[in-house]
Image: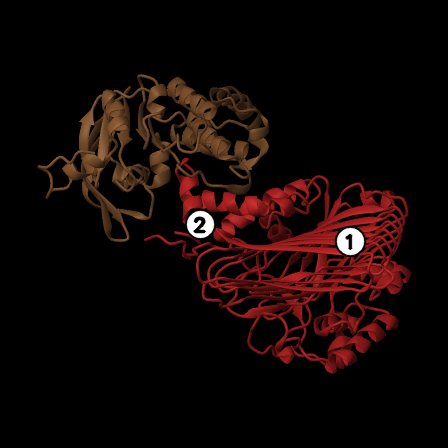
Amino acid sequence: MSTVELLGKQEYKYGFVTDIESDVIPRGLTEDTIRLIVAKKNEPEWMLEFRLKAYRHWLTMTEPKHWPNISYPEINYQDVIYYSAPKRKATKASLDEVDPELLRTFEKLGIPLTEQKQLAGVAVDAVFDSVSVATTYKEKLKKHGVIFCSFTEAIREYPDLVRKYLGSVVPTNDNFFAALNSAVFSDGSFCFIPRGVRCPMELSTYFRINNSESGQFERTLIIAEEGAYVSYLEGCTAPKFDKNQLHAAVVELVALDDAQIKYSTVQNWYAGDEKGVGGIYNFVTKRGKCAGRNSKISWTQVETGSAITWKYPSCILQGDNSIGEFYSVALTNHAQQADTGTKMIHLGKNTRSTIISKGIAAGKSNNSYRGLVKVMPKAENSRNYTQCDSMLIGSNSGANTFPYIEVMNNTSSVEHEASTSKISEEQLFYLQQRGISQEDAVSLIINGFCKDVFLQLPMEFAVEAQRLLGMKLEGSVG
Amino acid sequence: MLEIKDLHAGIDGNEILKGINLTVKKGEIHAIMGPNGSGKSTLAKVLAGHPAYQVTKGEILYEGKNLLAMAPDERAREGVFMAFQYPIEVPGVSNAQFLRLAYNEKRKHLGEEELDPLEFKDLLKERAKVVEMDASFMTRSVNEGFSGGEKKRNEILQMAVLEPKLAVLDETDSGLDIDALRIVAGGINQLHSPENAVILVTHYQRLLDYVVPQYVHVLANGRIAKEGGKELALELEQKGYDWLKTTATETSGATVRAS
């Protein structure tokens, strides 16, 4: 009778559109488009060169369509709008100058930006379509020497730092989407934690796509100098549109000697409807470089949104004794497709990496883990531990694991564990027999399955993530 | 409290229960016995609302309400509890977390305030004494890595926390060594009161040495073949079930085969 099957009636509560006048450039991408973006943003010559170099390289590249386990119709890159900014120009000297409509939008998303209502303990950079509209706690952070601002401001105010690190982890020619991003990125967040400073609060960026025709191409650059520590959070949502929107971001992290960066994401882009109409195409390149000795970079991601997710937050373990971690929950429902995982590149001696990946596939969705562990000849005594677990809900979803392991010395060890399970009717019945509703039961089982990852999230985020998973699966069994 | 009338039920189109009649009143302990395949566990699962079983005929009234119209979780919140023969593992979910959720669901249902984790911890500590379980069980994942005996004790712990009005214990004695059996039976006795009722589903008589039923019903071929007091269980222990199998089948109802 009631086999676990998909009903899927969950409403996406962030699907509203903000009615705001925007400064939009014509669709399409040429060198002139890039010059126009540079002009709009008043960028220096070196930025134009950076972008053009990336663009020219991009023209020679092809979209990676053959190897990821995803399929989607041809993207017409000439049909995308590469820059869209709310018109009333906020110079952001003060929050009072931000368009109240934007403040209301972010408040509705649970991200109050105004002085009185700001989230305690978390500094937020709010990005709306192509631009950053507000950054909170900037002054307070500055007292500690921490720079946290929009990318536009960083290019203007801290050009030396930006020039030094931009593209140092993800080169402009790294891959098709990174090249595209390097050519047209319009804003994003910049964080710099100076030597010996433990960032006194969580830093976060909230990304919102509002325009139905524009893509979002943002850039995040986080630098932790010697002995510095920072925990950074990223959240994202978008309105419901029938059309697909392109999101191609690049995130670069640099950790010097003894520095630690903890990067957490709860991704909740609009995923399209039950039939797979609409939703965000999320093609993201995230990479951290443990440049210094004893440095550590941890990626924690909870991926619940997007029609397509193509994303491999990675670590280059260059410094001796450096540590890379990747904790991931990827949930797909309906017609969503995710091909996500990580790359751990061991270069330094005694480097260690841990990968914990939990994939949950419901509906007709397809969920793949793809991970590379590469231990180079000089990375002696390195270790990796990988655990990939998949859970299937219903009988129409799919889960795959594609591990790639290359070890080039004989003093290192690599472990890989994988499992696939299903929520069984017996498990649901057991919980229901104790008075727990079916939906709560599913949520409890899923949260138990993801526990190892949720433990890595900052507290508020963990609560949010648990709630989100429950919501996303509401009505997915019956 | 419970009235089962001419209950027919089965799985995948195979009829297993072929007309069960049973009445259970507050304060009573009933034992359902019978050979393998007689329908004992099916009866327990139908009472709890297992989705794989279909009721084809008959009715079940629980406190005057139509039990069959309620979802399994509704039945549980109304006070129907089933101890599973094979308790299920829930990885990553601690016993305490699970029990608190279940307990608060019931409280919400009764219009009472939910307990926070600290308040619940105290309650859990108290109730755990019933089955002599120590605190380490509470932080472990539900039934994961538990021995057979620990799983059964955990079932009785859940019963102690949820305080059901009607507890259906499905072969709770199976796979228990004598010490665990003593603990589990002791737990059941402590929890039984004039205000609730217990149905013990068991293959063997030995549990009934510890938990003494007023009524024993013997199932064979999906029907109640014989009913009596606690002495019937002893009789079964001596004679086995074979003689009942034959009396229960319609065609050979007249001949009693010596066993």
Q: Are marks 1 and 2 on the same chain?
A: yes
Residue B58 in percent (x, y) is at 18, 41
Q: Position of residue B189 (x, y in %)?
A: 38, 19
In the image, is A33 to the left or to the right of A3? Answer: right
Q: Amino acid at mark 1?
A: Arg
For chain A, give the colour.
red
Quick check: A291 left or right of B35?
A: right
Q: Residues within 10 Å of mark 1 (few under 14, many from 20)?
A: many
Residue A93 visible in this rendered orientation of the protein:
no
Chain displayed in brown? B
Protein chain holding label 1: A
Q: Residue at x 44, y 40 (%)?
A: A431
Residue A418 vertical placement versus A55 (above, below):
above
Q: Where does label 2 land, which residue?
A: A424
Identify the residue shown where x is 22% and y is 36%.
B242
Residue A418, placed above or below residue B225: below
Q: Can you tell which quarter of the image residue B192 is in? A: top left
Q: Residue furthest bottom?
A: A60
Residue A347 disc label = none
**Disc 1 target residue:** A383
| Of marks 1 and 2, the one in the foreground | 1
- x%, y% of residue B76? 36, 34
Name the secondary structure under disc 1. strand
Nearest the viewer among B161 and B43 is B43
Q: Earlier in the sequence, mark 1 or mark 2?
A: 1
